[in-house]
Image (cartoon, grey):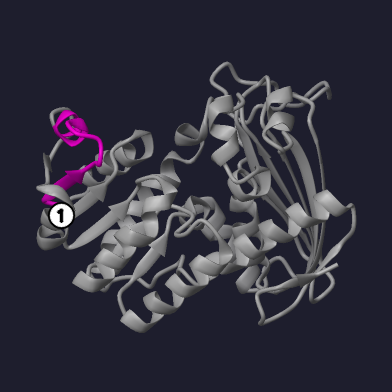
Amino acid sequence: MRIGVAGVGRIGTMHAAHLASLAAVDEVLLYDPIEGRAEQAAAVLDKARPATGVTGLLEQADGVVVATPTDTHPTLVRGCLAAGTPTLCEKPIAADLAEMAVLVEEIDASGTAVLVGFQRRFDPAVVELRRRIVTGELGPIYHVRATGFDASPPDPAYLPTSGGIFRDLLIHDLDAVPWLVGEPVAEVYASGSVLVDRAFADADDVDNAVALLRFAGGAHAVLHGGRHDPLGYDHRIEVLGGMDSVAVGLDPRTPLTSLEPDGPRVNSDAYPGFPERFRRAYRNEMQVFVDVIGGRADNPSPARDSLVSLRLAEACERSRRTGAPVRINDGDGGSTP
């Protein structure tokens, strides 16, 4: 099997390396819009060679991973649809909700598999958490808490195009938590502050935020995250149900110190960033993509689900700016204060 990777920056190169490690993948074809970049990556990656532009990539690949800048995603995904080539596209598949809704309709009409790269859906521990929720092992869900803190703030030059903290950082929780709970969100309330760097305020953004989600069945989720954790990269999800209480992302590398006498201390090998924290998830993501192409697995992250997380992110941003809760209107893609 030949898999193409469009975009060989940090995350695209990581995907290519994971693909090359899979026995089912014979060759990894690389394309990047920056001249010479694909050749440089191919020189250091197993099973890899540069493709002859996007056309060569689509002509030869059995599946394509799209890891280019966001504004190029719709064009590349449409090219894959026209070729009938299964695709895994990094989030988001489009920059705004209206554009994404149109693209989702095209994807559904094409019948071509398109997976969205929300890596938590591929994380083995999160997958097990969802299994326990679906089977009822946790009982009725009372409460979910999601933690998401970067170790270091992003480059200030990135902030004006990031889309803001809810679209960029907390979008993963806004995807994973409703997927886990299995119910629509009825209302959101969000708040944020600038505590790390005034560059966030200059970009009309915040660097610490919280969001409260109320689900249709009455359960609540609290999402909190920020752009700086001095101990390391901390991303966890905790679920309290009527029969059990469980967590993912809590292990010896979690950057959290307990003040209890016998409590855990921060490991010197605390997670420095997302590639290390979600290493198993990213590798499994490529395995699942290959299995979807081969007809051995269902798509766990379909494009239509992306509408949910982006819709919630926009509602959270609106709530942060107005200071008021925002109700989520089922079925119409909108929200009301």
SS class, disc 1 = helix
> In the image as oriented, which residue stretches furthest toward the right?
324
Give the x, y percent position of residue 45: 18, 33
Residue 89 visible in image: yes
Please tell me whether residue 241 is drawn above or below residue 19 in the rendered image: below
Magenta-drawn segment:
25-42
Residue 271 visible in image: no
The quarter of the image holding the C terminus is bottom right
Give the x, y percent position of residue 255: 65, 27
Q: Nearer the viewer, residue 17 or 167?
A: 167
Please tell me whether residue 206 is drawn above or below residue 269 in the rendered image: below
Magenta stretch containing residue 41, yes or no? yes
Residue at horizontal 60%, vertical 59%? 175
Identity, as a three-letter code, of the amino acid under mark 1: Leu
Q: Is residue 289 left or right of residue 232?
A: left
> In the image as oriented, which residue stretches furthest toward the top?
268
Q: Is residue 90 left or right of residue 20?
A: right
Give the x, y percent position of residue 225: 71, 39
The quarter of the image holding the N terminus is bottom left
Please tell me whether residue 282 is drawn above or below residue 245 in the rendered image: above
Q: Nearer the viewer, residue 312 or 286?
A: 312
**Which residue corresponds to mark 1?**
57
Magenta stretch containing residue 47, yes or no? no
How many labels, in total?
1
